[in-house]
Amino acid sequence: MTTDCLFCKIAVGEIPAEKLYEDGDMLAFRDVAPQAPVHFLVIPKKHIQDPANVTTDDETLIGKMMRVGSQVAKENGLTDFRLVYNNGAEAGQSVFHIHMHVLGGRSLSWPPG
């Protein structure tokens, strides 16, 4: 855990979140500023700054993020959904703890605006 990281604090329960899934190394919770009718985040409890900092040791964990995201999407009635990772401030990353956005429940255009 990084002491100044918002998502690390959510992962250990210091900051509340509307949890949708939790196990020993993964957490899914609703986004506080949803961009779609269903919008939640999936994070590893291990602090990894961003996708560019994923190592070979993290490959299983990142694969689990995909599985958990898809599972929680289905549990929330989604068959079509978008998975998004942002890397760096210019790409839209505002919390520097790797996280996957899962969005659905409406038609999503490409490219996003």
Image (cartoon, helix red, strand yellow):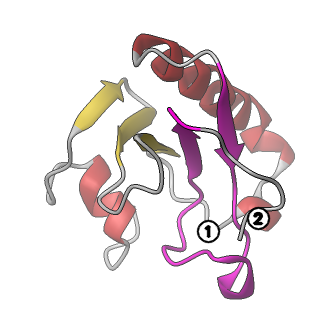
Give the residue at x 56% y 40%.
102
Residue 108 placement (x, y as % from top left):
67, 46
Q: State left or right for residue 111 relative to residue 38.
A: right
Residue 23 placement (x, y as % from top left):
37, 23
Q: Tell me which segment is drawn in magenta.
A: 80-106
Question: Which label number is shown at residue 53?
Answer: 2
11 in relation to 70, above or below = below
At numbered mark 1, what does the secondary structure look like: helix, strand or loop?
A: loop
**Front-most of residues 4 and 108:** 108
Residue 30 placement (x, y as % from top left):
33, 44
Looking at the rendered image, the quarter that the N terminus falls into is: bottom left
In the picture of the structure, the residue carrying the numbered disc 1 is 49
At numbered mark 2, what does the secondary structure look like: helix, strand or loop?
A: helix
Q: Amino acid at mark 2?
A: Asn
Question: Which label number is shown at residue 88?
Answer: none
Disc 1 crowd, CA 10 A, few/some/many (<14, 14-19, 20+): some
Q: Amino acid at mark 1?
A: Gln
The answer to whether marks 1 and 2 mark residues whose Cβ atoms lie closer than 8 Å is: yes
49 in relation to 51, above or below = below
